[in-house]
Amino acid sequence: MSASEASWLNFAAEVDKLLRTALLLAIGSFPQAALPISISNFHCSHIIPSIPNPPTSLSSTTIDIKHSSFKSLTAFLKTAQKDGLLTIKAKGDSITKLNAGHPEVAALLQESNEAATDSDDLAEEGELNEEANRPATKQGGHVSLWKPHGQTIALFSDAGFESVLC
C-alpha cells in the first residue's frame, strides 16, 4: 500500500467516525413523532448540523459522505440499519424508525451531558476565559443553523455569516 493510499484510508476513517458521531447525536435528539422522514431531509437537517468540531487535520468543508469510506448516503444508512440504529422504508427513500435507546446513542448522549455539566461547573467557578463564556453555536450536540434565502443572503453575508446549503 502506498503512502497516499494509507493517508486516504486514515482520512476516510476520520470522516467515517465524525459522520457516525453526527448520526448518533441526530438520533438522540430527533423527535420520534416526526417520523417518517425522508433520508435526504434527515441528512441535511439533522446529521450535517450534528457533525462535531473536526480535528485540525480535517476542515469542516471536507466532512462529507463522498469523502468517507461509504461514498453514498444510502450505504452509510444501510450500515446504520444493520447496526440497529434505524429502520429504512423498503423503497429506501425514508426513515421509519430511529433507535434512540441503542447503547451507542445512550453512551454518546451521556458523554455529551457530562461534558456540558463539566463546562457548567467550570463556568460557575470562573475558570473559563471570556471567549468560552460567549454563547456557543454548538451546545449538547445541537447546532444553531442560519439558512438565509432571497434578499436576506446579503444581510447575513455582510454580518460575516456563511450560507449553508444542503
Image (cartoon, rainbow, N blue to C red):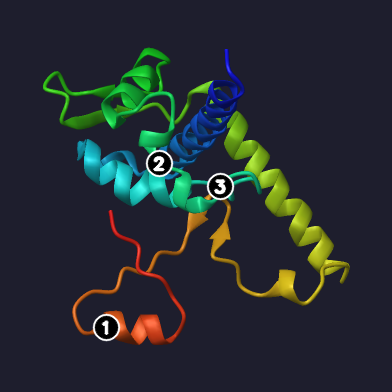
Residue displayed at 56% across by 59% down = 138
Residue displayed at 37% across by 35% down = 65
Which residue carries the number 1 mark?
Answer: 152
Q: How crowded is mark 3: few (under 14 residues within 10 Å), some or many (20 or more)?
A: some
Q: How crowded is mark 2: few (under 14 residues within 10 Å), some or many (20 or more)?
A: some
User: Which corner quadrant of the image does residue 88 belong to?
Assistant: top left
Judge from the rendering whether residue 70 lies leftward or rightward of residue 13; answer left or right: left
Q: Quadrant of the N terminus?
A: top right
Q: Residues within 10 Å of mark 1 (few under 14, many from 20)?
A: few
Residue displayed at 87% across by 71% down = 126
**Which badge, 2 or 3, is on the more N-terminal residue?**
3
**Which badge, 1 or 3, is on the more N-terminal residue?**
3
Which residue carries the number 2 mark?
Answer: 64
Judge from the rendering whether residue 153 lies leftward or rightward of residue 132; answer left or right: left
Q: Residue 52 carries which label?
A: 3
> x and y percent of residue 12 in the render?
50, 29
Residue displayed at 29% across by 74% down = 148
SS assignment at label 3: loop
What's the residue type where badge 1 is placed?
Thr
> x and y percent of residue 33 in the render?
27, 42
> x and y percent of residue 103 in the render?
55, 22
**Which badge, 2 or 1, is on the more N-terminal residue?**
2
